[in-house]
Amino acid sequence: MELTIALAQMNIFQGHLEKNYLKALEFLKEARKSRAQVVLFPELWSSGYDLKNQSLYAQQNLELMSELSQQAQENGFFIGGSYITLQEGHYYNSFILIAPSGQIISQYHKIHLFAPLNENRYFSPGQKPVTAQIAGLTGGLAICYDLRFPELFRTYLDQDADSFFLVAQWPTSRMDHWEILLRARAIENQALIAACNAVGLSGKVTNGGGSLILSPWGEILARGSINDEDFVQATVSLESIHDIRTNFPVLRDRHVHHYPKN
């Protein structure tokens, strides 16, 4: 079985939901032409990091979700990306995944908040990892700074994840870390990774692009351009994940019962 994944590496207009949505529609049009089944948008792609106005965006994102649900249903897509959300009095940076049915099937609240961008001042941290069933895959969801915490991905592995889906606003200044960390997470967990980054200016920070789709062997299946908008896609064999894990069974040799716990 094959799966086509598309990454919408976009330049986000901070504070302009309508402009960002219109741009998203252009990416979805490309995804439809390429017969993609999964489409990822970057972290906080609808609003950018204008956190002081989070209450406004949380409300507007509810309307946006309705529009995206219709797009998912009409085109048979899984659509994922992160948004500012308000739930039970708490604001979150939330990775929301919409199924081809138009239903929201998973919501992951970012656990590791990035203090240099004041996320810890404006958002509550998520309390648990979240997996999703995505077209035959069990995918662990993650957002940007989460990438630096391998224990999150090991937790997903213990929840039978065979893939990771990550959305980000990762800066140009740390692009070497971006690729190294993504390849490490793929190799050490023998997992497929789809990681969608933004480009362009976000406040005083420039996002670097370089979105990646990686095989469980750490091979680069598709790479986005650096610093420019791009539509990134790859068609992957789901059987290849099983084959890699079977033919090189590193994960079988984990001895978690010997590892001390805090």
Image (tube, rainbow, N blue to C red):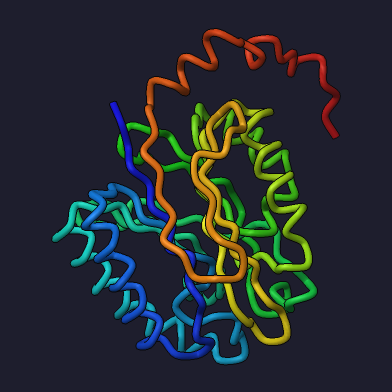
Q: If the image is split into quadrants, where does the C terminus sit? A: top right
In the image, is 234 to the left or to the right of 144?
Answer: left
Q: Percent from the top left, x then y, of residue 30?
A: 28, 62
In the image, is 234 to the left or to the right of 187?
Answer: left
Q: If the image is split into quadrants, where does the N terminus sit? A: top left
Residue placed furthest toward the left: 74
Say whether residue 141 is visible: no
Q: Residue at x 69, y 74 (%)?
A: 119
Say whether residue 184 is visible: yes
In the image, is 161 to the left or to the right of 261?
Answer: left
Which of the two residues, 91 or 235, is positioned nearer the viewer here?
A: 235
Q: Percent from the top left, x then y, of residue 202?
A: 63, 82
Q: Residue at x 65, y 63 (%)?
A: 125
Can you tell which quarter of the image residue 39 is in? bottom left
In the image, is 231 to the left or to the right of 182?
Answer: left
Q: Which residue is drawn at 74% across and 50% down?
A: 148
Q: Residue at x 30, y 52 (%)?
A: 78
Which of the two residues, 32 or 102, is positioned nearer the viewer here?
A: 32
Q: Percent from the top left, x then y, of residue 140?
A: 51, 42
Image label count:
0
The relative height of residue 190 versus residue 73 in the rendered view (above or below) is above
Q: Percent from the top left, x then y, of residue 186?
A: 62, 34
The relative height of residue 132 versus residue 206 in the rendered view (above or below) is above
